[in-house]
Image: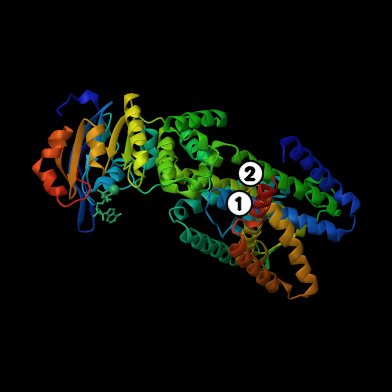
Amino acid sequence: MPRPLTFTAGLVALALLLTFPLVFTLPYPRDVMIRIFLYATLATAWNVLAGYCGQISLGHAVFFGTGAYTSTVLVKSLGLTPWAGMLAGAALAVALSQVIGYPVFRLRGHYFAIATIAVGEIVQTFMINWDWVGGARGLFIPIDRTGSLLAFQFRDKQVYYYIALGLLLLALWVTRRIERSRTGYYFRAIREDQDAAASLGIPVARYKQRAMAVSAALTALGGTFYAQYILFIDPESVLPLSLSILICLIAVLGGVGTLWGPLIGAAILVPLGEATRIYLGGTGKAIDLLIYGFLIMVISVVQPGGIMALAQRGRRRTG
Amino acid sequence: MDRPGEGVLLDVRGVTKRFGGLVANNDISFRVGAGEMVGIIGPNGAGKSTLFDLLTGFQPADAGEVLLDGRPITRFRPDEISRLGVARTFQKLRPFTQMTVIENVMVGAFQKTTDLARARRDATNALERVGLADKAESHARVLSTGQRKRLELARALATKPRLLLLDEVTGGVDLRSIPGLVALVRELNAAGTTLVVIEHNMGVIMDVSRRIVALHLGEVIADGPPAAVGRDPRVVEAYLGQAYVR
Ligand SMILES: Nc1ncnc2c1ncn2[C@@H]1O[C@H](COP(=O)(O)OP(=O)(O)OP(=O)(O)O)[C@@H](O)[C@H]1O
Ligand SMILES: [Mg+2]
């Protein structure tokens, strides 16, 4: 597509997204959209580290949980607004990501992925046993019905809708900025061949840490949003391995290492998850994962580049 | 060979590398003056590529020292050594296959700039120098071996090195491309880049460099002008029965 056309299409899409909650006033469709935005944000954040820089993390729930727990603990103990908590959560996630990254980035390929799973499990177990932050019982976010924007709690889902959309746009914007900078080139070079990258002067470890920091921060923002949206968090909901895997699957389905891939993946997988939950009844959860697993197998056999690669191939044929 | 200390760009002092019981590099010493072009020869397994790995930080030396401009760089990381102005190519080529040719070279060019447009210009220049400018927008994975060699060379050049280490530029390349590559290497040297070139093809190396270091079983067995090294009995013996002696 020529540039002005792409730009116009983007504006139209944005206008449609902005008017959506005005047209669809029922909570349910809004809820589905909010989940799409949230998961798309998480997958976009994951994509910075895994898609561009090639470091497949299966422990990103740690950063999601960090965001959720930080803002929640701060609002409960200090009465701090979750907006500030959100920033604190992102900062803590960045710090944590650097501590985790230092040893873990010494590992390559599958070993890295396995190590991130281990870190995720350790953190979850740790939180389950830490009573001061609710342990396995979890934490309720104190209800605040003042309706003040500062409280980050809204009766009307519409506000959550716009916040989630804002987070997604932020994640996409950050990704775009990286893509078009030296950092983006360096990330991709590291993904493809880190020895060749080093031979060209790239401080590989430092750039991996950078990718991890950006990815962790964006993921943590999503965690705080989740906590304020659901108003209850526990290690089972914000720190599970299944969340880390789901984030990965969404990005893989849509296409890793592409700007729009994670959003496309979320737009497909989230409604699909909803559908299976409705038609397959309350036990839907495990069946979701079965379907996700099956989808990933199909993708990796038929189209390893995800849906974005399919789209690009189509474009090349017609163009 | 005995040149004053100040003209010396690379000073290799007794480097040794063992892989288990195998001594791949044994007490290797030589110096490379600024602006020189030195050829490194030796039969398969002589330790040539290992030597490059030691010089560029890809393998830690077990003993010895490497000095660049008189400063020790022995324990430096590959990226640090690269930023000090030492570029290398790999014997087993390592293009970024999912990137285009120009993007590959831009990665190198980014060492000297953060500006995208400038990196693109520098990369285009490097591609022109190696004669690959017409392939700029192609994907690296569709290139032939000869083109990949040129790509790797352009990528290294884009870092604007003072010292360039080339590991078998003509290896695996079809015969017709060899003269072009040789001419290119000559040009680079003429333009002021110091070169150390590993080469299997004796004809090529004797032709391009005025000084040759011969390795055998990890040791320097000769160091001098091509004609003298070619006649050296230890070199002749080392190469005995090897097909590429011409
Ligand atoms: N990483 C390694 N681990 C163990 N042994 C190695 C390693 N790298 C090289 N060697 C061994 O060290 C010796 C020197 O290898 P090197 O690759 O340096 O030789 P070379 O002179 O470059 O040979 P060629 O002309 O075939 O490229 C060989 O016997 C090789 O098998
Ligand atoms: Mg070799």
Q: Judge whether residue B125 can be spotted in this image.
A: yes
Quadrant in the picture for the C terminus of chain A: top right
Q: Nearer the viewer, residue B89 or A262?
A: B89
Instruction: Give the residue type at disc 1.
Output: Asn
Q: Nearer the viewer, residue A47 or A12?
A: A12
Chain letter behind tag 2: A
Judge: label 2 CB < 8 Å from ligand 1: no
Q: Give how far across and how far down residue A199 sits, in percent.
A: 40, 41
Q: Give how far across and how far down residue B186 sits, in percent.
A: 32, 29
Q: Return the residue at label 2.
A: A175
As helix, strand or loop, the secondary structure at mark 2 comes to helix
Q: Judge whether residue A227 can be spotted in this image.
A: no
Q: Return the residue at label 1.
A: A47
Q: Nearer the viewer, residue A308 or A315?
A: A315
Q: How many marks?
A: 2
As helix, strand or loop, the secondary structure at mark 1 comes to helix
- What is the basis of the colouring in this image? rainbow
Q: Earlier along the polypeptide chain: callout 1 or callout 2?
A: 1
Instruction: Check whether the beta carbons of the residues at disc 1 and disc 2 lie within 8 A of each other.
Output: yes
Q: Residue furthest front?
A: B176
Q: Residue at x 49, y 52 (%)?
A: A101
Q: Is residue A295 above or below residue A9?
A: below
Q: Is residue A13 above or below residue A275?
A: above
Q: Is residue B127 left or right of residue B177?
A: right
